């Protein structure tokens, strides 16, 4: 955590979780079929596949972001 940002980019959910990290994972999950065919997206898509508890994690992230509200972080 830096002096400029109160969030931790290594945390997806919970105290200090970064809203950009959560949004990044959610975006790739929602568009995985389309992006999976693009060679440049292979690395981020591989990163998504390595998350074993992805459905539960995405659900937690979405709930967290709804609770945070629509205001920018």
Image: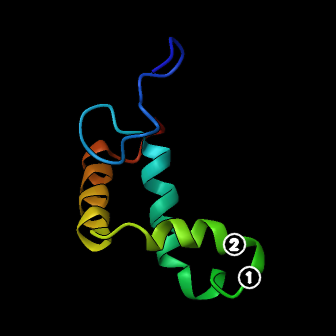
* Residue located 65% across and 80% down the image: 35
Q: How is the image coloured?
A: rainbow
Residue 19 lies, with reference to residue 32, above or below; the image says above
User: As drawn, is 26 to the left or to the right of 39?
Assistant: left
Name the foreground residue: 14 vs 69.
14
Residue 60 placed where, x, y %?
A: 24, 58
Name the foreground residue: 43 vs 59.
43
* Residue located 31% across and 70% down the image: 52
* Residue located 31% across and 60% down the image: 62
| Residues under numbered marks 1 and 2 in contact, where contact means CB atoms less than 8 Å apart | yes
Identify residue for label 1: 38
Mark 2 residue element:
helix
Identify residue for label 2: 41
Q: Based on the displayed image, in which of its 4 quarters is residue 10 positioned?
A: top left
Residue 5 placed where, x, y %?
A: 49, 22
Mark 1 residue element:
loop
Residue 14 placed where, x, y %?
A: 24, 41
Residue 57 placed where, x, y %?
A: 28, 62
């Amino acid at each position: 955590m830096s002096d400029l940002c109160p969030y931790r980019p290594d945390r997806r959910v919970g105290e200090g979780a970064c809203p950009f990290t959560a949004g990044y994972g959610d975006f790739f999950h929602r568009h995985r079929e389309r992006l999976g065919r693009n060679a440049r997206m292979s690395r981020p898509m591989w990163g998504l596949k390595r998350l074993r508890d992805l459905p539960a994690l995405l659900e937690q992230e979405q709930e967290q972001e709804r609770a945070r509200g629509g205001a920018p972080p």
